[in-house]
Amino acid sequence: VKAMSSSVFEFFSGLTVMGLSPSVGSTFGGTAVRVSGSGFGRETCGRFGITGSCDACIFVSNTLVVCKSPPATEQGRVGVMMSLNGADFEGNAMGFEYAMMPEMYAIRPSIGLELGGCAVTVVGHGFASSQDMICKFGRTEQTGIFLSESSILCTSVPHVAGKVQVQLMV
């Protein structure tokens, strides 16, 4: 019997997943998750949970890839499965936890005196009264006050005239 045509099939020894960083991200997805282990290749893909597609990851080395978490319909822990071929998966029992992460949309007002003391409302979603909120004006931190699931009250700090980045840290 003669072979009509041929193609190449590659055998590989398998993947090992050792850790995830970070291991928590927003239910909105988009978290860049560093997956450490061994046996990764340029074709490595990752799947969050037991269903869904195996999405391409950024290959850094045979011991590190970076995968973007997809959106989730609910909070909770899911397994992270890695594959070189989209069919054979190795996973991480530690998993990835989806959580409602606070997200900041705007600040009102966005201008105040350099003396500080201006009441600034941070508008967003996912804020919880049980969380310690820190408002950061440039490099200076100030405790925020929970108002609602969609607003936090911050007080501006003294600062020389000019623009600064405002961040909300949980």
Image (cartoon, rainbow, N blue to C red):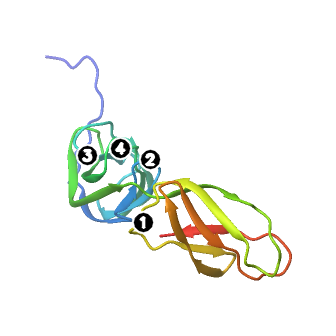
Q: Earlier in the sequence, mark 3 or mark 1?
A: 3
* Crowd class of label 4 (few under 14; some 14 to 19; many from 20; radius 10 Å): some
Q: Is residue 106 left or right of residue 60?
A: right
Percent x, y for residue 11?
22, 45
Q: Earlier in the sequence, mark 2 or mark 1?
A: 2
Q: Amino acid at mark 3?
A: Gly
* Residue placed under numbered mark 1 in the picture: 129
Q: What kind of element bears circle 2?
A: loop
* Residue placed under numbered mark 3 in the picture: 49
Q: Amino acid at mark 4?
A: Ala
> To which quarter of the image does residue 101 belong?
bottom left
* Residue placed under numbered mark 2 in the picture: 28
Q: Is residue 97 left or right of residue 108?
A: left
Q: Nearer the viewer, mark 2 or mark 1?
A: 1
Q: Earlier in the sequence, mark 1 or mark 4?
A: 4
Q: CA distance from mark 4 to mark 3?
A: 9 Å
Q: Nearer the viewer, mark 3 or mark 1?
A: 1
